[in-house]
Image (cartoon, rainbow, N blue to C red):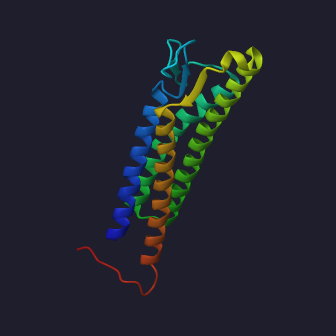
Amino acid sequence: MARLGTLVLVAALGALLSFALLAAAVGSDYWYLLEVAAAGNRTGLPGPLSSHSGLWHICEALHRAVMVVLPLSLVLIVIGWMCGLLSSLAQSVPLLLFTGCYFLLGGALTLAGVSIYVRYSDLAFAETARQYGARHVQDVHVSFGWSVALAWGSCASEVLSGTLLLAAARALSLSRRPGAPHSVVI
């Protein structure tokens, strides 16, 4: 039973970390970095036109999908955390299995949101280069900032929480088999 408690506790901490990382990522403005080398600048340092942007600055169709999916993922993490708490208190194998799968699906939703954002950004830059010509964007360097890294970390933490909850369900199931050692609390 100590193993079960450890698995559930680490899963809860992982879910809390996932929420914190995704909340910081969604609220920050360092998703997309744009660095423009100034004409005649041989130092390689970014020019005065360099900038960064977050999720809330561009409102096009694909981008709106990301603006819905990632905050929805935050809400799902909170609901999953409550389900995990209830299932661990009830020591219910089906509830632990449900919550573990729920976190895995939430991780997949976060992964989908970040992947859509990365792909959208790539397509937007390619379209800009097509419209204005490669010559106009040759000094432009596009990259993703630390906000994207936080979102990826949130996804990994959410999947880890789901996996640990599935392991907790298995441990609880094995401890309830006939012939397995049982402990009695008086």
Measured as percent of width and height from the top left, residue 46 is found at 50, 19
Would residue 110 be visible to someone looking at this image? yes
66 or 179, which is in the foreground? 66
Q: Residue furthest left?
A: 186
Image location (x, y in percent) of residue 136:
69, 15
Task: Name the image quarter holding the C terminus.
Answer: bottom left
Is residue 22 placed above or below 30 in the rendered structure? below
Q: Nearer the viewer, residue 34 or 16?
A: 34
> Which residue lies at the image location 52% right of the left edge and 51% below the top edge?
103
- Residue 56 visible? The answer is no
Name the spot of residue 32 as percent of width and height, x first: 55, 26
Q: Position of residue 24 (x, y in %)?
A: 42, 32
The residue nearer to you, when weighing 100 against 88, is: 100
Q: Is residue 127 above or below residue 107?
A: above
| In this picture, residue 96 sits left or right of residue 124 | left
Q: Is residue 157 above or below residue 37?
A: below
Position of the N terminus by quadrant: bottom left
Image quarter of residue 9:
bottom left
The residue depicted at 39 percent of the width and 45 percent of the height is: 16
Residue 23 occupies quadrant: top left
